[in-house]
Amino acid sequence: MAYPGRLALTVLALTPADVTAGDLQLLMFEQPGCIYCAAWNEEIAPEYPLTAEGKAAPLRRLQLRAALPEGLTVVSPPVLTPTFVLVEDGMESGRIEGYVSEDFFWPLLAGLIADARKN
């Protein structure tokens, strides 16, 4: 169940300048059979592109064991799923390892985006 005030709080946390500045992307490293990926897909995925975070950092799904696409650089290879890597202009700027619930995911992601905007 979604937290009713979460979207409103998130929209206030990200200004229009945050959404348009830089080239952010959220990489989701996943693998078949991952129950935490399935939970994220059920709880977050449908609304993600509609949120300020989704607009600021569009989602790109990658398989955990696949080679990293050209033009992307991460600090270290992800080892568990899901791992969410925020990249700015192709370079990792932050990471969330694992998924517990949307109550933890949204504030962590908003913090990563805000930190990326400070640099």
Image (spheres, rainbow, N blue to C red):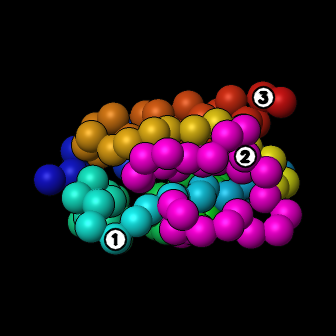
Is 64 drawn above or below residue 105 in the view shown?
below
Looking at the image, which residue is at 46% across and 67% down?
50
Residue at coordinates 60% horizontally, 68% vertically from top-left? 66
Which numbered dot is residue 74?
2
| 54 vs 98: above or below | below
Amino acid type indicated by mark 1: Pro
Residue 71 highlighted magenta (yes or no): yes
Quadrant assignment for the C terminus: top right
Determine whether the residue tagged by mark 3 lies in a helix, strand or loop. Answer: helix
Q: Pointers 1 and 3 in contact (CB under 8 A)?
A: no
Q: Secondary structure at mark 1?
A: loop
The residue carrying pointer 1 sits among few (fewer than 14), some (14 to 19) or many (20 or more) residues within 10 Å by Cα, namely few
Residue 11 position within the rendered picture, expressed as x and y whole percent measured from the top left = 50, 46
Mark 3 lies on residue? 118
Whether pointer 1 and pointer 2 mark residues with C-beta atoms closer than 8 Å, the reply is: no
The part of the chain drawn in magenta is: 61-87
> Where is residue 102, by image quadrant?
top left
Question: Where is residue 17 drawn, in percent x and y?
Answer: 76, 47
Residue 32 disc label: 1
Q: Is residue 68 left or right of residue 97?
A: right
The local crowd at label 2, few if under 14, some if 14 to 19, many if 20 or more residues have their Cα within 10 Å, is: some
